């Protein structure tokens, strides 16, 4: 963090003293991601004006400027685009990979998109429009068409000639894709080419067992394949197995980060946002949170109705009221443990819908062990501490049994509800993350109170 502050001071010193060549040389030594972060911090803290922001960007060496631009947040990108001349905009976009250009376009307002498309060549514009037509959550929407393409009849020497001629504009050349009449027939790495004789045919050394994805496959499932197979890139084909693009590992990481953030927000009963926390307005944050809170508040009225229906019983044995928060909290926590575990398993593909029986059986066994443990500890605490040491006459053996028995039953019910609701949601086509802590807690609260009150009625004769 200290190095980051020093870098900011260095930039400001060079800028304000008009030592532009020194600033250019300084920026040339930085990583594009660091340049982007430094510019964002300076601009957001109002240490530099919009005009100075543009001036700094223009001083970034050409081979770094497009990469730094890609790393910036949409607000910064739009501020720079507004200040760019058409020539500057064309140069920046022309040096960017196609998938990065598409990502930026998707974040920009219509007037900015129109200007970007006006300043790219016809072929790039056509390719952008092709990718934009794919569904937002599909593999096609995150792919790039900038890949190294070879043919099986090429010799290794021909392959190197092709890579040298076209590789500079490709997003990756470490893995080359072998096509025959546009159909994907194999892959070959540059390492394999280097270790082969110049006369060898690409078709003889390529790997024919190629793992690929379809343009309409879910992008989250595709991104998880990178972790499973340790890929750096993954080919994307159409229905006829024609190669239409590739997805690189950096795009997969972005998808996984976005999906994880979305799941966390849903699990906390918050409508997912596309903007960072500090860049989301108060009203927008309120809109994200209030619908869920209203729904949960209304659903929680069932808990109040259950307590009201047992008012007379609680009036006779008032001490039972003191244990309601403990029972409800234990149930909510138990259900959350099960739901979060299952939701995560579903997200990573570790659990399938067909595993529902195995999941329930496992959670029931866990619930029995947890329930017995909590019940025994609770009974011992009530009898030894509350009854004997503190001398609370209201707590007797039967009351302790009611509380301990309710805890054990509540854990069993909570674990069952917690593991089944996410799988039911998945089966119905909803995001399992919706069925997380808030919903589980609300349902389990009502069920635990019903168990508590009925068990008390049965054992205490209320």
Image: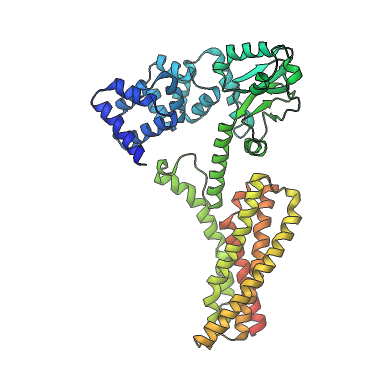
Instruction: Find residue 420 and report its horizontal and vertical position in percent.
Output: 69, 56
Q: Could you say which quadrant of the image residue 32 lies in? A: top left
Instruction: Find residue 107 and report its horizontal and vertical position in percent.
Output: 48, 31
Task: Count the numbered circles shown.
Answer: 0
Compared to residue 92, the image places residue 374 above or below, namely below
Residue in view at x 65 percent, y 53 percent = 342
Left or right: residue 283 versus residue 267 is left
Instruction: Find residue 308 and report its horizontal and vertical position in percent.
Output: 56, 73
Q: Nearer the viewer, residue 62 or 293?
A: 62
Q: Nearer the viewer, residue 95 or 134?
A: 95
Instruction: Find residue 28 and report its horizontal and vertical position in percent.
Output: 39, 24
Name the quadrant of the N terminus: top left
Q: Could you say which quadrant of the image residue 2 lies in? A: top left
Residue in view at x 65 percent, y 76 percent = 405
Q: Could you say which quadrant of the image residue 69 lies in? A: top left
Left or right: residue 71 versus residue 366 is left
Query: Is residue 291 among the parts visible in the rendering?
Result: yes
Left or right: residue 29 versus residue 322 is left
Compared to residue 278, the image places residue 214 above or below, namely above
Name the quadrant of the C terminus: bottom right
As drawn, the residue found furthest toward the left would be 17
Residue in view at x 54 percent, y 36 percent = 254
Q: Nearer the viewer, residue 18 or 241?
A: 18
Query: Is residue 453 among the parts visible in the rendering?
Result: no
């Amino acid at each position: 963090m200290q190095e980051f502050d020093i870098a900011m001071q260095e930039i400001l010193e060079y800028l304000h003293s008009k030592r532009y060549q020194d600033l250019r040389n300084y920026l040339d030594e930085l990583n594009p991601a660091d340049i982007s972060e430094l510019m964002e911090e300076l601009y957001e803290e109002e240490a530099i004006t919009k005009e100075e922001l543009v001036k700094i960007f223009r001083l970034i060496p050409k081979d770094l400027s497009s990469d730094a631009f890609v790393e910036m947040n949409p607000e910064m990108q739009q501020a720079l685009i507004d200040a760019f001349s058409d020539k500057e905009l064309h140069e920046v976009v022309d040096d960017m990979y196609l998938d990065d250009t598409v990502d930026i376009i998707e974040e920009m307002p219509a007037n900015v998109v129109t200007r970007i498309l006006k300043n790219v060549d016809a072929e790039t514009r056509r390719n952008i429009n092709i990718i934009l037509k794919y569904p937002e959550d599909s593999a096609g929407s995150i792919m790039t068409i900038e890949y190294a393409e070879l043919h099986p009849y090429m010799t290794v020497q021909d392959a190197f000639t092709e890579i040298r001629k076209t590789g500079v504009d490709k997003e990756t050349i470490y893995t080359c894709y072998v096509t025959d009449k546009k159909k994907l027939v194999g892959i070959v790495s540059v390492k394999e080419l280097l270790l082969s004789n110049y006369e060898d045919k690409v078709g003889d050394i390529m790997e024919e067992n190629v793992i690929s994805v379809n343009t309409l496959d879910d992008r989250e499932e595709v991104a998880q394949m990178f972790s499973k197979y340790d890929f750096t890139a993954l080919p994307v084909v159409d229905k006829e197995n024609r190669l239409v693009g590739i997805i690189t590992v950096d795009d997969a990481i972005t998808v996984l980060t976005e999906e994880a953030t979305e799941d966390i927000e849903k699990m906390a009963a918050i409508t997912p946002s596309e903007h960072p926390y500090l860049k989301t307005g108060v009203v927008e944050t309120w809109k994200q949170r209030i619908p869920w809170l209203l729904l949960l508040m209304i659903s929680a009225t069932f808990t109040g109705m259950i307590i009201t229906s047992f008012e007379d019983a609680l009036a006779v044995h008032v001490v039972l009221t003191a244990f309601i928060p403990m029972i409800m909290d234990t149930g909510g926590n138990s259900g959350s443990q099960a739901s979060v575990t299952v939701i995560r398993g579903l997200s990573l593909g570790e659990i399938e819908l067909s595993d529902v029986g195995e999941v329930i059986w496992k959670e029931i066994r866990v619930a029995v062990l947890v329930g017995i443990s909590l019940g025994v500890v609770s009974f011992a605490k009530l009898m030894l501490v509350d009854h004997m040491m503190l001398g609370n006459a209201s707590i007797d053996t039967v009351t302790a049994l009611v509380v301990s028995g309710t805890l054990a039953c509540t854990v069993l019910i909570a674990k069952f509800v917690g593991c089944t609701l996410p799988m039911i949601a998945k089966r119905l086509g909803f995001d399992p993350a919706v069925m997380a802590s808030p919903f589980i807690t609300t349902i389990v609260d009502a069920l635990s109170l019903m168990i508590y009150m009925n068990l008390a009625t049965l054992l205490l004769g209320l």
